[in-house]
Image: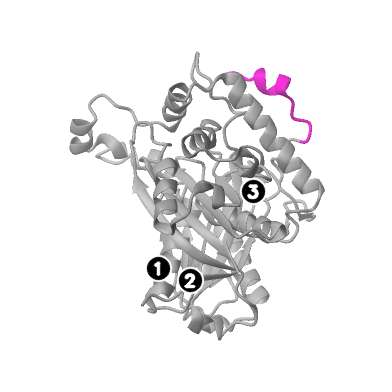
Amino acid sequence: MAEKAYIVSAVRTPGGKKNGSLSDWHPADMGAAVLDELVKQTGVDPKDIDDVIFGCVDQVGAQAGNLARNAVLASSLPESVPGTTVDRQCGSSQQALHFAAQAVMSGTQDIVIAGGVEVMSIVPIGASITDGMKAEHGFPFNAKGIEKRYPGIFFSQFTGAELVADKWNLSRSDLDSFALESHIKAANASKADLFKTEILPLEGNKGSMVISDEGIRYDASIEGLSGLNPVIEGGVITAGNASQITDGASAIMICNDEGLKKIKTSPRALIKTITVVGDDPVFMLTGPIPASKLALKKSNLNIDEIDLYEVNEAFAPVPMAWAIELNADKNKLNVNGGAIALGHPLGASGTKLMTTMLHELERRKGKYALQAICEGGGTANATIIERI
């Protein structure tokens, strides 16, 4: 019989704007900060942590060389704690969470930290791809098998976002309105200090503490959003209705019943269901739809029984199409804003969203919450948690 997987603590850093207040942080140091905070919050003896699994998308430069292990070495954790780094693109730390859950559910490990970090100011988005293009075999998708299977296709998230918007008849006005709502919800949540309990303040470049997300546009307007040029000529995707480039880290401690004996706090949620699926790599961003449907089916739940949904706002059409296909209550979707306003620190976003979702589920005294993230290559993870 499988063990249960509990969430006992969850934390994230503020989201730093590109070249903003957190841009001087080394990724390993930023990862170490959230590791140390989890130890502080749970009172666990650091030597009892069986593993650290971190997500990171662009594993080059400062983020190369097994970032998870380097974060451990930069932290207060002993050398005996191992670490490994995973890449499932934008869902990397959600996948790290799934691996951690599987480890404790199997009973092979009792306490595992899952998280992620991406300092996009230091390691630009796509750095791992462009760096690879200098090599003999060039672009990652130049494999003969891929070219044979998808002749003439240039895989692009921007193209995928346009395809999604077109398929679900989402206009530029629809997308900009959704983006504005993201900023309004995030601004309201920040002003009400709703993020205060989940954010670990970090010292900024100028010495002052960064205590809130830098990407929120408190003065966002539909006029400003509608005035932005599309990324693709004639398209509907703009910098305003897509996620922001962000620096950040997040981490969640997962344990089973044996692990609970080693911590000084009570479990907060149960990981009820985890799924991962492959979907159309050309549309690329539609994976959250089948991943969520599968998670609901495995949980014997319907969408109306879920109290909160977090669907990553990589591009506005993604959660919008998801809500249409799942027949979801939009009032439960990304209730405190999403990546359009709060940022998308790639490898950290999975456990970042989960941290926010957990805190909001507790605040509302809800029972179930569902999270899904679209990922490069057409895959997606979905997770359903149950508040304890």
Choose top left, top right, bottom left or bottom right for residue 76: bottom right
Badge 1 crowding class, 10 Å Cα cut-off, few under 14, some 14 to 19, many 20 or more, is some
Residue bearing the label numbered 2: 5
- The secondary element bearing badge 1 is classed as helix
- The secondary element bearing badge 2 is classed as loop
Asked if 46 appears above or below 348 in the picture, the reply is below
Q: Amino acid at mark 2?
A: Ala
Residue 287, x across and y down, in percent: 40, 41
| Residue at x 53%, y 71% (from the top left corner) | 6
Which comes before the other along the chain, label 2 or label 3?
Answer: 2
Badge 2 crowding class, 10 Å Cα cut-off, few under 14, some 14 to 19, many 20 or more, is many
Q: Is 18 covered by the magenta stretch?
A: no
Q: Left or right: 220 with respect to 263?
A: right
Choose top left, top right, bottom left or bottom right for residue 164: top left
What mark, if any, has residue 102 been given in the picture? 1
Residue 326, x across and y down, in percent: 48, 40
Secondary structure mostly seen in the magenta stretch? loop
Residue 45, x across and y down, in percent: 58, 84
| Residue at x 63%, y 30% (from the top left corner) | 178
| Residue at x 50%, y 33% (from the top left corner) | 324
Q: Is 222 covered by the magenta stretch?
A: yes
The magenta stretch spans which residues?
A: 218-230
Residue bearing the label numbered 3: 23
| Residue at x 80%, y 55% (from the top left corner) | 208
